[in-house]
Image (cartoon, coloured by chain):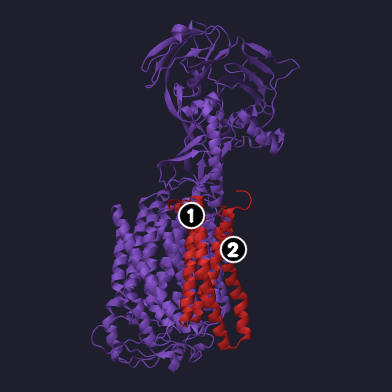
Amino acid sequence: MNGVGWWSLVRFLHVAGAVVWVGGQLTLTLVVLPLARRSLSDEARDRFAAAAGRRFGMLTGAVFLPLQLATGWAMACHRGVTWASLADPGYGRTLATKLGLFVLVMLAAAGHGIAYARGRAELARTLAVVSLVGSLGVVLLATALPAT
Amino acid sequence: MTVPLGRPEPTRGHRPSDSGQSAQPAQPAESVQSVRGGKPGRSVPLGMPGRSGYLGKPGHFGKSGLTARHLRAHVVVVVWVGLALPAAGAQQSLPVARWLAIHLFLLGAATTAVVVWSEHFAVALLHAARPDERWSDARLAAVNLAVAGVLTGVATDLPALTGVACALLVGAVTAHLVVLVRMGRGALGGRLAPVVGYYRAAAAALLTGAVLGGLLATGHAGAGHYGGLRLAHIHVTLLGWIGLPVLGTLFMLWPTVLGVRMAERTTSVARRVLGLTGGGLAVAVAGLTAGWRLPAVVGVLVYGAGLALAVDLFARTVRGRNPAAATGAASPASPDGAGSPATAVGPGRAPALGVGSRRAPLSAAAVQSSAAALGWLCAGVAADAVVLAVRPLDRAGEQIDTLVPVLILGVVAQILIGALSYLLPIVLSGGPKERTALQAVLERGRTVRLVALNAGLVLVAAPLPGPCGTVGALLAAAAGAVFAVLTAMVLVRGARRTGTGGSPRRPVLLGSAAGALLVVLAVLVANSGGVGNDSTGNDSAGRSGTGAVAAGEGADGATVVRTVDVTLADMRIRPSRIDITAGTALKLKVTNKDAQRHDLKVDGGPATPLLADGESRTLDLGTITADRTAWCTLPGHRAAGMTLDIVVQKRGQKRGQKSEQKSGQQGTGQDSMAGMTDDGQMSTGDGTGLDLTADFSRGWTSRDPALAPARGGTVHRVTLHAGPRTVEVAPGVKQRMWTFGGTAPGPTLHGKVGDVFEVTLVNDDPAMGHGVDFHAGSLAPDEAMRTVRPGGRLVYRFRADHAGAWLYHCSTAPMLQHMGNGMYGAVVIDPPGLAKVDHEYVLVSSELYLGTPGSAAQVAKMRQDDPDAWVFNGVAAQYAKAPLKVKAGERARFWVVAAGPSDGVSFHIVGTVFDTVYKEGAYLLEPGGSGGSQALDLSVAQGGFVETTFPAAGHYSFVDHDMRHAERGAAGTVEVTDR
């Protein structure tokens, strides 16, 4: 495919979605929350962290997740990926692993929200880091997939 | 925060220091009163002998840093186990997964547990100072990093990473061993101090195991020693690193979980058992490493004897439960501490005393699991000894392989289950109530789990049909998984409790570690079964390319299918390289001819299952359009050299051209020739699928090149049987040949001018007709050269009127195939007045075409004059392996006949000049003149001889100076020694 076509737009949306989600997690973890911890009072910090988490979670559920699923599904159809081919070594297996890791990341992210809601701060943080590191792994696996 | 040990009977033998220590007042926060049986038991000091002595920090117990450290360590253990389970599930499809499953479990989970607990117990048992926490953490981290490195290195086939990680592991374990040894110096020592000896011996065993494993995984073991080293590795790690700490710990754990006093003679028995098991293991491992069976069997038997001694003590402990209780009841006076464990390492729950009936054990799960584990260990050692005794070592590996999973699950998993069931609640809990609650969680369904696990293992171990084994494996796996879930639940509870006091960085560390492990695992899965995107890229490129080639082929005819026999043996794949024309459909007939199992996997393509000795599978690679590689996926085998390159050549490009290009790139022709004379044999040669540097099979002998003297008399009567025969035509390569007299070339006939040869040709070939054509005689071909039907015979009578080196060959069409498959030979007729020489040799040059004789693929190669090798006397590189032997100053005559079927020969001996050349009935050069000759050139079906004198000792290569031919088999060596 030469030039910018419709499929490159789909891929762009997929990649951009991932960039925003992973970047958002990194920004929250490395920039926003540490600053909040340092500069806000305990109560304000907790409120802020909860609000930021909720907002990011909503963004994830409402925008990011549907976008990734839709664009990912479309690209897989376009490339002719079948269920059976997911087991094949090479492209299929890499894609399947990426999807599996993505599911785990999403579970960790959901678990983070639940743990936070139940006041299990430490577990929540652990799961947040798992989700962040795992999503970097998803990106790593994605880069191993040749372009559609 | 410690673990209670067996409660020794109050004996006089106690050293003051012991009682003095144990007599530390039970501090409120550090002592626990048993509530079992509703009666308060005796308080036992919980203090951890550590930096602050038994006093510790009152009230700090529950949230101590030690608890957090144990929690972390056990999270790591659980993660390793968690990774091992999917790997175990995948082992049917991926051989490396089996290796991964075993090593994730043993090298990951079990090693972490052993390192943590052996250090912990050593401190307690020796009453030693606790080593610096940071260094302990560093050692543990180094061990885990090394383990991750080894696993990644093997799984992704990076021997360098594996080697470095092994070195790190050796370093970390050495540090662990040093700590254990130094701890003993100046320490007070307790009654159970000998148990620490088990931990030291175990660390030494892991060192040995790591070194052996490193050799195996990086391919340094060598084919000859691989089997023995592997067995030694298995024994030293399973029976040493895992078995010894388990056994040692049981000496204290067993009475503890039973809730009885330690038997009086425990100390002495522990010492004796360590001597027997450790010594026996050392002998066994040394024997296995050296490949000696007797010491191996004796060593395992001695190990078994030690084991039996320990089991005997444990059994007596169980039987002695009542009396012990009674004694305890009768003398409750063992005053605070005086009779308490010499080495209190935990919140001992003093059993309720004075109960008339048998007491229930403190931890029923621990008792059951430990007993079952011991049973499996005994059974495993016994089976091991039997296997080693009845099977030669190179065959024992496979049997022992089937023992390993059973041992792992039966012994290691069960001892882990038993120990964790008892220890985790103690370690993680802050008080008796919580401990009881945690213990209740861990003991949920213990009997069902125990029965399921052990019944499953019996099903796996017993020689039952396939489904039974699967059911057993599932049962065992389910039981293990349930326990893993229970452990995780307990850990989560513990984490919740300690969570509030934890450091803010901990979630980050834990999360990063868990996330990183997930990613590593994902990458491993993604890369399993061939490197991902590259091969895919090749495939897709290949597919579009195929269309183009196939279109081109439509004009030429059908796609050529080539079947290549591939042999797996001695850590080599033969051939090591297959050259193939682009667009050819390739099939590999893979046969394992090794005592150990191998497989062959083509990147991005099909793979064979694991093949046992003699098993064979055919891989259909389809149309080959791009270079491919194949290898054996067993860990370490690829690194050891088990690879196969499939190299595509462009259509129309002849191999010779390719090899010329290559040697042109590599250096001048002179260089390569210098290399050739240096080794006295040719390099593997570019462009050939044959590995000419490999060894011939055992028992192979070269064809005697010496010309037998002509028999007396003028009539030579010879019977020639025509028929097929399978012979080794190149190192390790067997080929079905069509022969005269069972050899290719056929027997050499030798006579003088005027002799009559009366040859009776008998066609023994059941499948086809053959004839014969002797160039040395002149006669009407019609009758003499007719084709003889299978089972028929004819007499071919000719008079050798002329001298020369003559060809004879099969006269049946298609002669290209009959000659290409080996039906040719030489007739040597001495010219009158031929001078005597010291040595007289006959060399018949020809081409070698591998593959099924007469198959389309083989015939295509013959038609294209694209042989697999060029040979002297039928076998590639045979005289490079078995040189001709001459003394310096001796004179030799070389008769050469070019049999073809398509290529002639330019016969040259490196380092010599011919002073006599006789070609096609005439002397081209005779001694005495000023001239010399460098090569005897013969077209197909011509013959002659050359003579030369070897000036000095050395290795003189004789070659077909067409280097395409020389580098692919038509070369040998004359080894000249001093007189």
Residue drawn at 40 percent across, 16 percent down: B762
Seen from the viewer's position, the closer of residues B218 and A119 is A119
Callout 2 secondary element: helix
Dot 2 or dot 1: first in sequence order is 2
Position above or below: A127 against B678: below
Q: Residue at x 40, y 20 (%)?
A: B768
Q: From this viewpoint, is residue B352 visible?
A: yes
Amino acid at the residue labelled 2 = Ala
**Mark 2 or mark 1, whichever is nearer to me:** 2
Looking at the picture, which amino acid does disc 1 mark? Arg
- Chain B representation colour: purple
Seen from the viewer's position, the closer of residues B739 and B864 is B864
Above-or-below relation of B604 to A33: above
Q: Chain of mark 1?
A: A
Name which quarter of the figure residue B660 lies in.
top right
Residue B371 lies left or right of residue B291; in this view the side is left
Circle 2 chain: A
Residue B661's spot in the image, x, y percent? 67, 34
The numbered dot on residue B595 is none
Circle 2 residue: A16
Q: Work out which quarter of the rendered image holds the C terminus of chain B and state it.
A: top right
Element type where label 1 sits in the image: helix
Q: Are marks 2 and 1 in contact (CB under 8 Å)?
A: no
Q: Residues within 10 Å of mark 2 (few under 14, many from 20)?
A: some
- Residue B337's place in the image compared with B388, above or below, is below
Outermost residue, left side: B357
Q: Position of residue B643 (x, y in %)?
A: 53, 45
* Label 2, label 1: how far apart the Cα atoms are: 24 Å
- Colour-to-chain, red: A
Question: Where does label 1 land, which residue?
Answer: A93
- Tell me what residue is drawn at x 37 percent, y 53 percent: B399
Percent from the top left, x then y, of residue B383?
A: 34, 58
